[in-house]
Image (cartoon, rainbow, N blue to C red):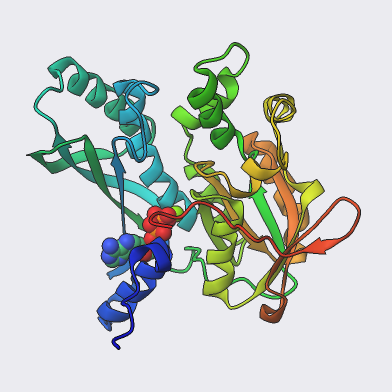
Amino acid sequence: MKAKEKGLREIGEFGLIKRIRKWVNSSDPGLIQGIGDDVAVIEMGSKVLLVTTDILIEDIHFDRSWIDPFQLGRKALAVNLSDIASIGGTPKYFLISMGLPKNISLSFISSFYCGLKKEAKQFRVELVGGDTSLAQKIIINICLLGEGRRSDLLFRKGAKVGDDLFVSGTLGDAALGLKILKEKGKAKGSEGLIKKHLSPCPRIELGQAIAKHHLATAMIDISDGLLIDTSHLLEESGVGARIREDQIPLSGFYRKWVRSLSGNPLQFALSGGEDYELLFTSPCEMREKISPLARSFRIPITRIGEILPKKEGLHLIKKDGKAYSPSHLGFEHFK
Ligand code: ADP
Ligand code: MG
C-alpha cells in the first residue's frame, strides 16, 4: 500500500518553509542570505540590498471589529519594519499589494493609507508601488526594501556557546492584549496591553545601534513568540540555550491582568506572538555596553539566558532552579 502523503497539518508552516528552502536551493553568488532569515540580503556594490515581505489576511491575522483601518495601515508596515530591525538595517522603500472585497468603503481604504503614511513618515520609508485585486477577504502584502553595510548586519546564525541571550522590551503584552480583546472587548485598564497588539513599535533604531556597534553575534525579531523564535535562532546558529523564567521581562499591565486567568502565568510571554521585540546574543564582555544602550533608547534590555552547546537543546529554568524542556513552543500556521 502506498504510504499516505504528509500534509501541511503534519509539517506545519516551518516544515513547509524548510522544504521550499531545499527545493529552491539558490546558489546565486550575489545572494548573501536567501530563505531562512528575517530578511534576504543581496550584494549591491559597497552596500547590500535588504528585502523582506509579510502578509496579513483578514480573520487570520486581524479582525475588522477590533482594529481600525488607520491602525491596520500602521501595523501592516510595522511588522515588515521589524524584520529590517532584526538585521540592523535601514528601511528605505516599499510596495503594497492588496486583495479587497467589493463591499469595502472608500473611507476604510483612505484611513488605511493614512495609517500607512504615518508609519512610513515616522520611519522615513517611501511607498513606490504595489498591486490591487478583488478578493473574498482583505489581504495585505508589503514588500519592504532596505540597505545596510555587510560587515554590520546581524543574522539568525552567528550565536556562540557562552554568549548571553538578551531581549528588548517586555514580552507577552500583545498576546495577552489580543486575548482580552477577544474575550472582554476593550476592557477598562487593559489599554496598555491592547495597544501593544494593535500598534506594535518596530525597534529600528535599537537594531541599528546593536549592529553598528557590533554588540551582538546573532539577532531575530520576536514575531511568533519567544520560544519559537529563539528556536529559529538556535537552529540557524547550531547551538542550544537556557532561558531563566524569572528573568523574562514582564510589564506591570501583564502581571496585573494575567492574575485573573488560569494556566501558566508565563504562557503569553513564552509562546504568545506579535511582541516585535529584538532577541539577540552577545559575548559576555559586551555586558557593560548593553545597559547604556538600554538607557539611551529608554527601552529595557534584559539578559534572559545563555547559549549552550547544541546537544543541550532549548530548556527553561524555573524559579526553584528546576530545568525543563517546553513541550509547546508557540504559534505555527497549519498546525
Ligand atoms: P518572519 O517571521 O521573520 O517573517 P518567516 O518565518 O515568515 O519569517 O520566514 C522564514 C524564512 O522563510 C524567510 O527567509 C522567508 O523569506 C522564507 N519564506 C517564508 N515563506 C516562503 C515561501 N512561501 N516561499 C519562499 N520562502 C519563504
Ligand atoms: Mg522576523
Q: Is residue 88 left or right of residue 46?
A: right
- Quarter containing the N terminus: bottom left
Question: In the rendered image, is residue 39 in sight?
Answer: no
List x then y, in percent, for residue 147: 34, 56
* Quadrant of the picture in which ligand 1 is shown: bottom left
Q: Is residue 67 above or below residue 306?
A: above
List x then y, in percent, for residue 54: 32, 49
List x then y, in percent, for residue 116: 28, 30
- Quarter containing the C terminus: bottom left
Q: Camera-side residue: 58 or 220?
A: 58
Task: Identify the image quadrant of residue 210.
Answer: bottom right
State the residue lying farthest toward the top: 188
- Residue at position x 59%, y 11% in the image: 188
Q: How many marks?
A: 0
List x then y, in percent, for residue 330: 55, 53
Q: Is residue 129 above or below residue 48?
A: above
- Residue at position x 21%, y 38% in the image: 127
Q: Is residue 106 left or right of residue 118?
A: left
- Residue at position x 19%, y 20% in the image: 110
